[in-house]
Image (tube, grey):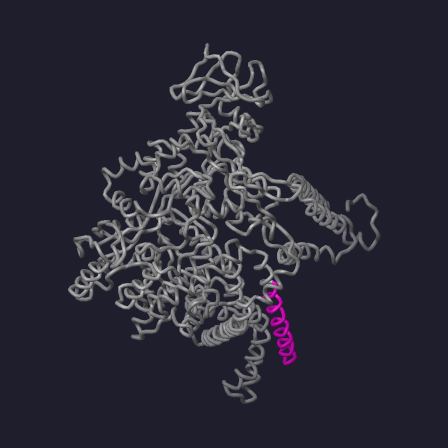
Amino acid sequence: MHKRAYGALAVSGVAALALSACGGSSPAPSSNAGSAAPTVSDTSSTSTSAPAPAASSTTGAPVRDANVDLVIWTDADRAPTVKKIADAFGAEQGISVSVQVAVDTRQQFKDATKVGKGPDIVVGAHDWLGELVQENTVAPISLSADTAAKFSESSIAAAKFNGQNYGVPYAVENIALMRNTALAPDAPKTMDELVKTGTEIKQKSGGKVTNVLIQQVGKTGNAYYTYPYLSAFGGGIFGTTSDGGYDPDKVLVDSADSIKGADVLAQLGKQGILSTNVGDDNAEGLFDAGKAPYFITGPWATTNAKKANIKYAISDLPTLDGGGQMQPFLGVQLFYVSSKAKNASIAQEFVTNYITKKDVQLELFNALGRPPALTEALDEVSASNQDVKAFFEAGKDSKPMPNIPAMNSVWGPLGQAAADVISGKAAPEARFKAAQAEIVANIKKG
Amino acid sequence: MSQATKASPAQSMYRTPLWASVLKWVALAVVVAAAFVLATRLADQGYTLYIVVLALVVMAVLAVYSTRRAIPAKYLLPGLVLLLGLQVWPIVMTVSTAFTNGQTITKEDTIAAIQTNSVQEVQGSPRYKLSIAVPEGGDVASAPISFLLTAPDGTYEVGDKDGLKDLPAEGVQKTDSGKITAAPGWTVLNARQVNARKDLATFAVPTADGGGIKASGLSEAFEGKATITYDAATDQLRDSATGKVYVVRDARFVPQDGQGQAFPQKWAENVGFKNFQTILTDPTIRSGFLKIFTWNVVFAALSVITTFILGMLLALLFNDERLKGKGYYRALLVLPYAIPGFVTSLLWKNMFNQEFGLINSLTGLNVDWLGDATAAKAAILITNLWLGFPYMFLICTGALQSIPADVREAAKIDGASAGRTLRSIIMPLLLVAVGPLLIASFAFNFNNFGLIFLLTGGGPFESDNTSIGSSDLLITYAFRLAFSGVTPDYGLAAAVSIFIFVIVALMSYAGFRRTKGLEEVN
């Protein structure tokens, strides 16, 4: 209230929230906290992680260690594993390596790199890429065609911006349909089936089950969870350019296909299947309390579901009537090399020849639990891990989340449009047309 | 001054003890030494202006504290320096940012980055296994570097700044992957030695088609070619692959023909009054401003009034001498103040949930607290009341305890009722003491970004416009405005914050004039 520490606390609180969105478990569509960007993961995912070695306890940016041959920044979740890998690489090359924890990795990397104090390598999500290029902070990485072919196609596409490659992928993640097998033993193929079975379960439960489907919406909406409804009909957010990248001049939010998806959102809202009262703050809690049979979420939610002793299974997102299967956004985790790297040669060597190894990708998987981007490693993991296999299957035809800076202008308007349609405040077609106009105007602002 | 100096009679009466002099000079030496260290660091980074400012501050410190003159300045200087550093400096920075486009990178850096980023592997060219070497006997740190290359077909080549030559296979040792580890006549550099060669960044073995063989890490090389070149004479970029020409507009390179994408990088540029002009002429800003401004004033005023009334009533209650265990009650009441505000805000957000929230389920209401414009405003005020009343309670308790007992007694003797005493004696005295704090509280709430951001995010938004929320304050609105575009616009954000500063300053000035009037009651 008064000028005391509240302001500072609020700011650090916002930072903490933002970082949990960019952090461990999320595909980090938190590009821009101001434009009501969705927090995909729950905030608990970072707080439950073990503290990293050599981590500073403050939220400030780490001070670059000047006396080593390679400096890597990552968040606290990943630091222990990255350190293990980097140490092995250091021993192989006869060099010293330092892995430092940057709590708000994305911002701290940008700020530090601009003044020449950043690391040589930073670990982050692929949707940071446009912004990092925009600020001249990352260097191209030349992967040979042979090496690139070892990765899933979409993960390589995600590391590209304007036709240039800037990162080496190590993990992919996407949302899928999670179900409480105690309530719903079988995976629904279609949304109609999901609604029908779910409603029966709800009616039979005698009030114990309150929701058919949990999906983050919130009062300001969530574009990340909205996208699959658009993609099911072939709609989406951006069209593509000739080189395969996303084109900020082709916004597809009001395309006929996207509006079909909006109609489904309106319908589900009307039936009470989706609600703006379910948001990032309570979605996981509701599912983990056994109050809903179905939950659209990502691998980050499995940890707490296990803790809550929920028996769950993962399956593909359902198909929508009149359209195809809902396709989620793909998030790809990358190793980036700084454009101002003091040890550029070693950094390039590490990402191109070491991170691309199967054993390294497996080690990263074992610690972080996301499907590896390297096909060989993925195959090995899928053979033994049902969750990973199912999550990968659900996203195997999906497209990477846009990594162009124009995406900053989409989160707010598209999320809000979805929320208004779900709550019945606005008609789908008119509302999505308005969102389109707003997004286009924002992009035009530059 | 030391004892050796001849002191005037007046001064000698207050002769400084030796230890104090020593302490003073040591402290001054420390200040000068610290400033020197700081100055060398600043010089390293090339901040000339900061060095000048620092020198002026140190000179002022020496002038004031090394002599016996300027006694008042000895007390004022620390405060002045802090005022300069913590208040004036940020204002200067904000104002100067408001006249720029808010970017920090230079045009030279941008051009260099665009060219580097445009390097693509030449189609169909071989990938070489690479070792970096210097001629035998040459200094590993400075001798001209050469690439020892193994082509995919197993042949060896050596590349230097003049081009590729064959490397005789005799005596060459290599790893399983084909990387050369030793060759007669060459010293192969190890990882650390390669890393130390900063000239490697610009080194390429020229090839016939105008490209160059470049290192990718320590053990691979590829033939790459920059597709984009910069022409300084025309200030244009040309893409040799597509033939597109890019010209400068608004501090970035855009396609000359208007077709296709501009480069995302923007460099720093002064834009004069453009940001201020935008604020005054932009249709979305103009349409939303009055509505947001009104709510902003109402929010700040109601927050202060509600928290003050609740805090004061509780303070009056707990100031009663007959009440036992006051310390415990007071400690309990301060609790909301002790919990971090952002935690409280998120908790309240949860409690306001229409379907699952505590408030609706306890009261049996079905209010869409965070989805309805009026309800959201009420929710914000309720949360802020919870957050703010302990502060008001504290300052009122303090002020009440400082009101002398004899004043009340006099009122009692004069036959004033309890209500009359409160209205005519206690309240005026209380307001004199807490008035300035109420104004400070108003100014703080006027810019209460955290509460709005965490509780409603400025929403709910009216259909088809997510730039103006019904619970937005000017500050949250400015934040969204500045960061909703493709590139964060710190320049515009700075300009908006200057407007907000002026508004708050004017209101606070008017408020302080009013409290001056109150003091005269005393």
Q: Residue at point 39% right, 49% down? A: A401
Which of the 4 quarters of the picture holds residue B515?
A: bottom right
Does the magenta run of residues contain B424? no
Q: Residue at point 49% right, 18% down? A: B157
Magenta residues (range): B498-522
Query: Quick check: can you spot residue B34?
Result: no
Q: Nearer the viewer, residue A267 or B71?
A: A267
Q: Nearer the viewer, residue A327 or B240?
A: B240
Q: Is residue A204 above or below residue A389?
A: below
Query: Quick check: can you spot residue A422?
Result: yes
Does the magenta run of residues contain B516? yes
Q: Is residue A433 above or below residue A15?
A: below
Name the magenta segment's main secondary structure: helix
Which of the 4 quarters of the picture holds residue A415?
A: bottom left
Q: Position of residue A211 (x, y in %)?
A: 24, 63
Q: Residue at point 64% right, 58% down? A: B95
Q: Residue at point 53% right, 49% down? A: B262
Q: Is residue B434 left or right of residue A200?
A: right
Q: Position of residue A98 (x, y in %)?
A: 46, 34
